[in-house]
Image: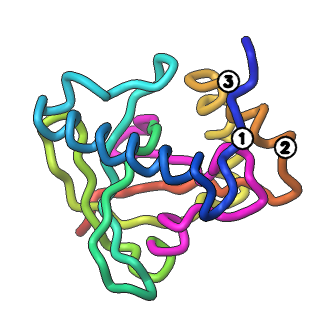
Amino acid sequence: MPASPRVPAPGSPGLKLMNVMTKAQVAIYRRTGGRFANKVKGAPVLLLDHVGRKSGQARTTPVLYMDDGSDLVIVASRGGSDATPAWWLNLKATPDTTVTVGRQRRRVQAHEASAEERTRLWPKLVAIFPDFDVYKQRTSREIPVIVLSPAP
């Protein structure tokens, strides 16, 4: 399988195009109740709501996920970039949020997986999206695995 392309540089035309495509994916997902724009290379996609930690602006990002019992698991890979995805920085600042899976909207609370959780979850994540291992090789940072648990 060919490796996924790298994330474009900040401010580049490639990143601007990627942002337009992301907004289109969110709009299609919402309009169709998740029937379309719901997979990337066969891996399922949810819509993650988060609030900009600096701007306070509400944002929505499509993110690959995996079910783990009542939890959802996502990966802050940013395509193997050395930069952390803004959505993860935003979630760390405000871990209580909502996600949309198909037509279902859920309240969740985010936390970074413990070392034990990560050891158990990483192989399962790679099984649903092998590019995660490619991304891991591209960066010197440990790619965060985030667990979204149902909000109390």
**Would residue 77 appear left or right of 27 to someone viewing this image?**
right
- What kind of residue is marked 3? Pro
Q: Position of residue 140 (x, y in %)?
A: 88, 56
**Which residue is found at the position 63% from the left and 50% from the top?**
78
- Whether residue 75 is in magenta: the answer is yes
> Between 72 and 129, which is closer to the camera in this rendering?
129
Q: Which residues are magenta?
A: 66-90
Q: Dot 1, how many residues are within 10 Å of its Cα: few (below 14), some (14-19), or many (20+)?
A: few
**Which residue is found at the position 22% from the left and 35% from the top?**
29
Q: Which residue is mark 3?
A: 130
Q: Dot 2, how many residues are within 10 Å of its Cα: few (below 14), some (14-19), or many (20+)?
A: some
Quadrant where the N terminus is found in the figure = top right
Q: Quadrant of residue 67?
A: top left
Contact flag, marks 3 and 2 (Cβ < 8 Å):
no
Contact flag, marks 2 and 1 (Cβ < 8 Å):
yes
Q: Secondary structure at mark 2?
A: helix
Which sits earlier in the primary sequence, circle 3 or circle 2? 3
Q: Secondary structure at mark 1?
A: loop
